[in-house]
Image (cartoon, rainbow, N blue to C red):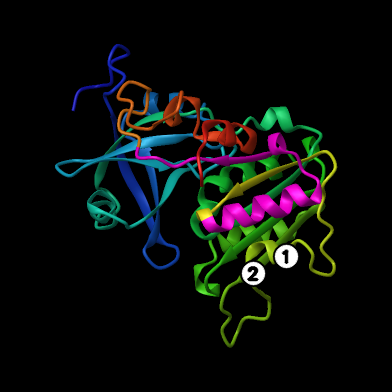
Amino acid sequence: MNPPSAENIYLPRVAVLDRVEDNIPDVKTFYWRFENPADQRAFRGFHPGQFVQVTIAGVGEFPASLPPSPTEDQIFFTIRQVGGCTAALHRLRPGDKIAVRGPYGNGFPMEQYQGKNLVFVAGGIGLIPLRSCIVYAIAHRSNYGRIAIFHGAKTPKELMYRDVLAACQQTPGVECHLTVDRGDNGWEGNVGVVSSLFKKPGVAMPVENTVAFVCGPPVMFRFVIRDLLAMGLTERDIISTLERYMKCGVGKCGHCCIGVAYICVDGPVFTYEQIKRLGEDI
């Protein structure tokens, strides 16, 4: 494959897998680096919440969130096996090559939230796109007020990024609350939907001067939004990502268009106020 050309926005860059880790059932994390060191250096300017287009030679291309924070040294993505492309990726091993283009999208404007309290609410693999923001906020701890993380999953085995959550629990001014739909013999935490954590004894949910990041399945999103609004957060202070199958990633093909917005360039990050204006039901 030839080196990337500045004139060709569709040309991916060759990357090499360094390590593959199992996370939860059907979900793996792939650590990678660009084959060309210049590409690696240029990529370091990505923002939390952006995404890339991943190519598996002879199979196809798909969009993937970037869960690492730009404050971290390694680049990786965490992918659930859901189709042909992701199944092909899950069969790859360290040393195998893929191709990546991007980063794309607007990302989370973390600098705009300096001085505010941050609330993160994630259901299942909804923690993947929020991980970058959480790690970024912890790395710039003095720039933010209180930080509260609420993460829920179907079972204890499906809780994501347990190492990151454990580190957050040890950070002053950071609260981390976990819940599952169904516990097991070793689970001593909360059982219930993630929004049930908001009013648990000992949970001081920040509302004033607060921005809430919400990602998860649609049914979770609707109930969490309802509860956050009832608690006093405004629609513009609730932020999420919209997921669509983005083919070009640069606003050319129209595949991810909703109303007047292209998810790949105007998003994928939107406030709930913007989501309602688009007429999107998530």
* In front of the other: 35 or 263: 263
Identify the residue at the far bottom of this view: 185
Q: Earlier in the sequence, mark 2 or mark 1?
A: 2
User: Going 84% across and 58% down the picture, which residue do you hit?
Assistant: 204
Q: Where is mark 1, residue-wise?
A: 197
167 relative position to 153: left or right? right
For residue 226: magenta?
Answer: yes
Corner quadrant of residue 201 = bottom right
> x and y percent of residue 2 in the render?
20, 23
60 relative position to 169: left or right? left
Judging from the image, what secondary structure is the residue with disc 1 in?
helix
**In this rendering, is residue 125 above or below 60?**
below
For badge 2, the amino acid type reads Thr
User: Going 63% across and 30% down the picture, which residue do you hit?
Assistant: 109
For badge 1, the amino acid type reads Leu
201 relative position to 177: left or right? right
Judging from the image, what secondary structure is the residue with disc 2 in?
strand
> x and y percent of residue 177 in the render?
70, 63
User: Going 49% across and 34% down the picture, which residue do you hit?
Assistant: 268
**In this rendering, is residue 115 above or below 164?**
above
Q: Where is mark 2, residue-wise?
A: 179
**In this rendering, is residue 35 above or below 223?**
above
Q: CA distance from mark 2 to mark 1?
A: 7 Å
Corner quadrant of residue 159 = bottom right
Mark 2 burial class by Cα count in 10 Å: few <14, some 14-19, many 20+: many
User: Going 35% across and 40% down the picture, which residue do you hit?
Assistant: 245
> Which range of residues does the magenta coloring cover?
219-245
> x and y percent of residue 55 in the render?
26, 39
> x and y percent of residue 3 in the render?
25, 21
Q: Are marks 2 and 1 in contact (CB under 8 Å)?
A: yes
For residue 213: magenta?
Answer: no
